Structure formats: C-alpha cells, structure tokens
Image (cartoon, rainbow, N blue to C red):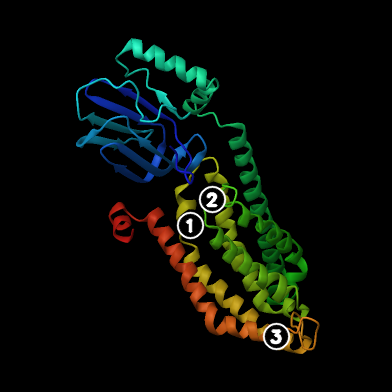
Amino acid sequence: MEKDRHLSPFVYWAQTDTAVTLRVELRNVQTPDVDLQEQTLSFSAVANGAQGENKYGFNLKLLKPIDTEKSKYRILDRNVEFNLMKSEIEFWPRLLEDTKKPAWLKIDFDKWTHEEDLSDEARDIMEDYPDLYNRVQAEEMGWPTKRESMKKVYLFLYNLWQFIGFIYIVVVMGTRYLRDGPASMEGTHLNVGWMMRLCFITQFLEIFHPMVGYTKGSVFEAIVQVGGRGIIFFCLIEGEERMQTKPVIFYLYLVWSLIELVRYPYYMLRVYDVEISFLTWLRYTIWIPLYPLGFICEGVVVLRDIPYFEETKKFSVALPNKWNFSFYFPNLLRCYLLFFLFPVMYKMMTHMYHQRVRKLAPPSWKKKFE
C-alpha cells in the first residue's frame, strides 16, 4: 500500500452514499504530487507531519471506481482534503480493495454517517492496532515521538557546536588582526587551525545525516562539499607546513567561517521550525560573493602547493613497488585546476541559485524556474 521511499501520513476517511472524503494530516504542504485515477489515488509531498518536515506519501487502491471529473482536492494550512465522488450511489463496506487496513488509515468520526458500520470499523481498527489511539493523539496534539525528539536534539546540538566553533575562529582571527594588522596573517593556522580541524572532522557527519534520514539533502552533494574542503584542509594545508603561513590561509578561513556562521544558525532554528526572515535571506544570499572568493582562495592554495609536493613527493607513489603502481600527486592538482575547479564552482553556484529561487523568489518566478 505504501511507497517505500515515502513516510506515511495519517489519513482519516469517511463516506456517504455518494462520496468518500479523505483528510491527510500534513502541515505546510510543498510541491504536492497527486495522481487520481478511476480506482487509485497516489499522493506525495514535502510537509510537516508526525516525523517532522519530510517527504510523505501514500498509494490507495480503492474498493470501487470513482468519478475523476467530479472529484476534487484542496490544500489547507493544516491538512489536505479530498472529496472523491462515487461512480455509483451506494455505501461501500470498506474503503480499500485489500481487506488489510494500513495503520495510518483511520476513521474520520466527525463525518461518518452510518453508525452501525462505524462501530464495526472502529472495533476492528483498535483490535488490529492497539496503540493507534495514542499515536493519533500525539500527532494531533503536536507531540513528537521519542525518536523524533532525540533526532531534533542531536541536530540542534550538532549545529550549535559548529556555530560556536566558527565563532571562535572568526573572533580569534579578528582580534589578532585588529591588534597586529596584516602581520597576524602568518600565524592564522597556528592559532585557529586546531579548531578548524575539529569542525571539519565533525562535518563528516553531514555525509551520514541524509543516509539515515536526519536531513533531506543529497548524499552526493554532502560528499562534494565536505569532502572537497576536507582535501583542501587536511591534505594541502595541514600536509604542507610552508603553506600554513601564507596570507591566503587567512582569507580562506575567513570566507569558510562567514559562510558557516550563517548556515549553521539557520539550520539550528529550522530544526524546531523557527524561521527568521533576515537570516533566511542571508542564508540564500551571502553565498553570492563568498562562494567565488572561496573557490579562488582554494585554487590559490592548490597552485601554490604544486611545487612543494613536487619537492617532497608527499602523497605520491613511485615505481618500483610491490603493487606495480605509480601516482604523482602534483599532476592530480594540475588536473583539478585545469578541468574541475570552474565546473565544480559553476555546479555549486547553480545549485545554490535554484535553492535561492525556490526559497526567496515570488510565486510567479518560482513557477518560471521549476
């Protein structure tokens, strides 16, 4: 009955002799996809439900045909309502062709008209799903499940930790610059590198968050963003001490930190559905100047590191060896600069641009770009 890729929302149903009504308990429904056929109804959308903001959906195989031309649905602030007109005037003994009832499908007591059938159906549901009443009450009152609560606490603390870490980096860098001026740039990595290291190590958790359903983002995008910065920091900066004293490290750390000082507070508040309009605007706008600056600084780090790694042969593998394999790390850096730096920058900025359009643009613009 359910699509595996969706969470199932609570659905309440009732009927008269002429129609079937469905009430889907989802709030703030976005990008709904409805497919209504003569005897099937498929629905999916991103919305707030029992498992927080997620993608929900269901697929119903109805007991008897309906009139698709006369049937309608509407999206409200707190639910989605379907009014399905029956092809023939009759009272259905049940809603679905399958006699087994899903746990998320329940009776809409307020709209049911046949008391005798109501009592039988209600008794069957409670016998089949003894914990259903508590689950329905918790969802309707907005009480999160224990798993949902722990997930939110974890995500809130994770984003808070990252926010505090990058605040420390910016404060230390700013204080040193105000005191010593440009001369402070040489000691940037020495003074804040340890905190940057801790932040980046924990950022690797962001690759696993979408894997376990904690966030909605793409695993591939997380790998590209976190992995790319990880290579720049752990291999090219920490792997070569002479690079750590260059002024470009100051500018790179500053750009990285300014981006994260907006991103993490935004996600921290979104965990509990709190949205500050200015912070949202900043989250989807600050990347416009900072992303190109960050890529340029990263490119400078790669370019400056090539002669160092040619000299030290670090991360390179030379022949002969027992694997009969050779690898020259400076050539990889050259290939990245020549073939991947600008395409990756274009891909990331295009992705952020589409996110900005979906989040900030007026409805007419959203339709134009979707």
Q: Is residue 180 visible?
A: no
x%, y% of residue 189? 74, 70
In the rendered image, residue 200, in percent from the top left (x then y), is placed at 68, 61
- Tag 1: amino acid: Leu
Q: In front: mark 2 or mark 3? A: 3
Outermost residue on the top side: it is 116
Work out whether mark 1 precedes mark 2 in sequence or the reverse, and give the earlier one. 2
Disc 2 to disc 3, C-alpha distance: 41 Å
Instruction: Identify which residue is drawn at 67% across, 51% down.
Output: 161
Mark 1 and mark 2 in contact? Answer it, CB < 8 Å.
Answer: yes
Location of residue 192 in the rendering, given as x and y in whole percent from the top left corner: 73, 65
Instruction: Name the residue: 54% across, 78% down.
Output: 341
- 304 above or below 369? below
Looking at the figure, which quarter contains the C terminus? bottom left
Three-letter amino acid code of the residue under disc 3: Tyr
Residue sitting at 76 percent across and 78 percent down?
A: 240
Q: From the image, tell me which residue sits under label 1.
A: 282
Q: Is residue 61 visible?
A: yes
Identified by mark 2, the residue type is Tyr
Question: Residue 85: which quarter of the image?
Answer: top left
Q: Nearer the viewer, residue 172 or 199?
A: 199
Q: Is residue 364 left or right of residue 180?
A: left
> Going from the N terminus, do you reach mark 2 or mark 3 first?
2
- Quick check: 186 left or right of 100? right
Callout 1 environment at 10 Å: few (<14), some (14 to 19), or many (20+)?
Answer: some
Measure the C-alpha gap from mark 1 to mark 3: 42 Å
Q: Which mark is residue 328?
A: 3
| Mark closer to the chain start, 1 or 3 | 1
Q: Nearer the viewer, residue 261 or 226?
A: 226
